[in-house]
Structures are given as structure tokens and as C-alpha cells.
Image (tube, helix red, strand yellow):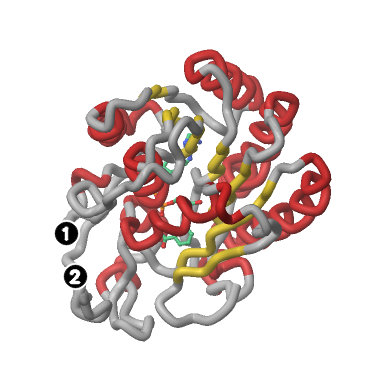
Amino acid sequence: MENPKEKYPKPPFQEQSQTWPGLAGKMEPKPDHGETSYKGSGRLKGRRALITGGDSGMGRAAAIAYAREGADVAINYYPSEEPDAREVIELIKAEGVHAEAIPGDLREEAFCVRLVNEAIEKLGGLDIIVNNAGRQQAHESIMDISTADFDATMKTNIYAPFWIIKAALPHLQPGSVIIGTTSEQAYDPTPDLYDYAQTKAATMNYIKSLAKQLGPKGIRVNGVAPGPIWTPLQVSGGASMEKLKKFGSQTVFGRPGQPAELASIYVQLADSNASFTTGAVYGASGGAGQP
Ligand code: NAD
Ligand code: MG
């Protein structure tokens, strides 16, 4: 038994900031992605997964869990995140499954298409796609968001999943799953995340429309909606210093979540045992309610 309130670090956190996209390895305290705790039981044996943003945060927690459940895993990340990605690749390989690293910029359509094709080629097919990468840059006012900023957020959070799903769909067999990382921001936006929050509403929405469109093909589409989670995204422009120091204090446990606490949700949504679950968004918000 573990008391969720006492399980992980609480605010106040020390001041820290990194240039985008940040590294988990440089955070203090270091996030827990389940490196030493996640135990698998063959739930995804023989499956082949592509996870964007698989180097850190929720993507890394999902990558470790998928490998320990027996899946082959390809991760995508931004090239400057190589140090985080290397650690994940080593952890995946330690499970005796295939690990593929495919770095590149998701804001480019040509790269998204190449990413899918390379993953299929290297893993011999794909049946789990986790569109998890995301860009979050906080701005107090809409007046502070440049067109280039707005465009980068839309490209990363909305266009990339669109391009990736289109490239993958012709190759997905019945039983395949698509999982998107949305957010509690989708339905309860904070004022400093004007652009980001609307992309998470869009993510929640595509999960529901695509689930209806692809259900008849035997493909399930679901989402995960985290609350405040301790990841590089928050220390590389995602939260103001003021917000970061008390990060997660508003949750019922008085602390942020850790990526490891969401790993089992990504596994559950990918597992064929969840065969009637589609168009669903699972929340992990520390008490904020239903997505
Ligand atoms: P993270 O920084 O660990 O992961 C985000 C990843 O997105 C990065 O590791 C990076 O690899 C990838 N990425 C961003 N822009 C990219 C680009 N142009 N090209 C390639 N890769 C790019 O942070 P995280 O919090 O684990 O984020 C994962 C998902 O969770 C995101 O979609 C985020 O919006 C969502 N989310 C996070 C929180 C939170 O509090 N941390 C809450 C709700 C939702
Ligand atoms: Mg990262």
C-alpha cells in the first residue's frame, strides 16, 4: 500500500529553467518514469509501437512500460534531446525487444511521413501509435504570442498527429490503436495557455471523431488527459517561474503527478483486452474531475 499523497516530491520546488525542449536528466528533482518500478506481464507481447516525445515525460513512461509488456518500440524526439533518448533506448533494449530511435522535427510534414515509414520498416509494421509530443509555451497575454509561436504550437500539437495518422493508416490492421495525449487544459484552460489549451481541445475532439470513423475498421482511438505532471515541458517555457515553484499544489494530493503514474493508462488503452474502449479520454489529474 502506498499513500498517493506522500508518494512523490511536493512543492515548493527550486527555481530552474532550461532552453526548449529541455532534458529530464537536468531536472531537480528528477522525474520518475517508472525506470525502477514498472513491472510488465506480457500484455503487449508482439505489438509494435511508435511513440512521439518518447525521450521524456509521459512518452518515456509509456515507452518503458510498453517494452516491459513485450512490445517493440520506436521513439521520436527532437534532435537536441539525444541524451534523454539514449537512456530510453537502453532501457527498452534491456527488455530484449526492438528499440528504434528516430529523431526529427514534427513540425515538418515530410519528416512525419518519413518517421512513420521508417518505424514500419524497422519494426516490421505498426499497431500502436502514441501521438504524445507536445509544445507548451506560457504567455501571460495573447498580445505576447507571435504568429510564429502560434504556428509552432499548432504544427506540433495538431498538424503532426494529422500527418502521422494519415501516413500510418493504410498500414494499420484491425486491432491497432491510436492514442493521443490531450490535457485537462482541453476543458478547463488556464489564462496563460491560450494557444496550447485550444490544441488540447482539438486533440480531445479528434479522438472522438476518429474513434467513430475508424471503429468500423477495427481500429480504436483513445486519449489520456494528464493534470500537472513533472516533466521538461514545464521547465522549458511551459510554466512561469512563479507557477513552477508551487507546481501541483492545487491538486488534492498537494503535489504534481509523475510520468510513471500514467504509464499503466497508456498500457491499458493499447491492450486488446480493452477492446470495447474507443473514443474515450482517461484522466489522471489529481482530482480535477472528468475529462
Ligand atoms: P516532455 O517535454 O517530456 O515531452 C514533450 C515532448 O514533445 C518532448 O520530449 C519532445 O520530444 C516532443 N516535441 C515537442 N516539439 C517537438 C518537435 N517539434 N519535434 C519533435 N518532438 C517534439 O513533456 P510531457 O509533459 O511529458 O509532454 C507530453 C505530452 O503531455 C504533451 O502532449 C503535453 O502537452 C501533454 N501534457 C503534459 C502535462 C504536464 O503537466 N506535463 C499536462 C497535460 C498534458
Ligand atoms: Mg523531452
Q: What residue is at 47 percent from the left and 60 percent from the top?
A: 138
Residue 106 as seen in the image, left or right of residue 229: right
Ligand 1 lies under 8 Å from the Cβ of mark 2: no
Indicate whether 124 appears above or below 287.
above
The residue under label 2 is which amino acid type? Pro
Residue 191 place in picture, x, y as percent: 55, 73
Give me the disc on residue 9.
2
Residue 142 visible within the image: no
Residue 127 place in picture, x, y as percent: 59, 33
The residue under label 1 is which amino acid type? Pro
Q: Are marks 1 and 2 in contact (CB under 8 Å)?
A: yes
Question: Could you say which quadrant of the image residue 199 lies in?
Answer: bottom right
Residue 30 as seen in the image, left or right of residue 229: left
Ligand 1 lies under 8 Å from the Cβ of mark 1: no
Residue 221 place in picture, x, y as percent: 67, 50
Name which of mark 1 and mark 2 comes first in the sequence. 2
Q: What residue is at 44 percent from the left and 28 percent from the top?
A: 74
Which residue in the protein does label 1 denote? Answer: 29
Q: What residue is at 23 percent from the left and 30 percent from the top?
A: 94
Depth check: give the residue in front, 281 or 200: 281
Q: What residue is at 47 percent from the left and 25 percent from the top?
A: 104
Give how far apart the Cα atoms at labels 1 and 2 are: 8 Å
Indicate whether 244 appears above or below 130.
below
Quarter holding the C terminus is: bottom right
Depth check: give the residue in front, 95 or 33: 95
Residue at far bottom of view? 252
Question: Could you say which quadrant of the image residue 112 lies in?
Answer: top right
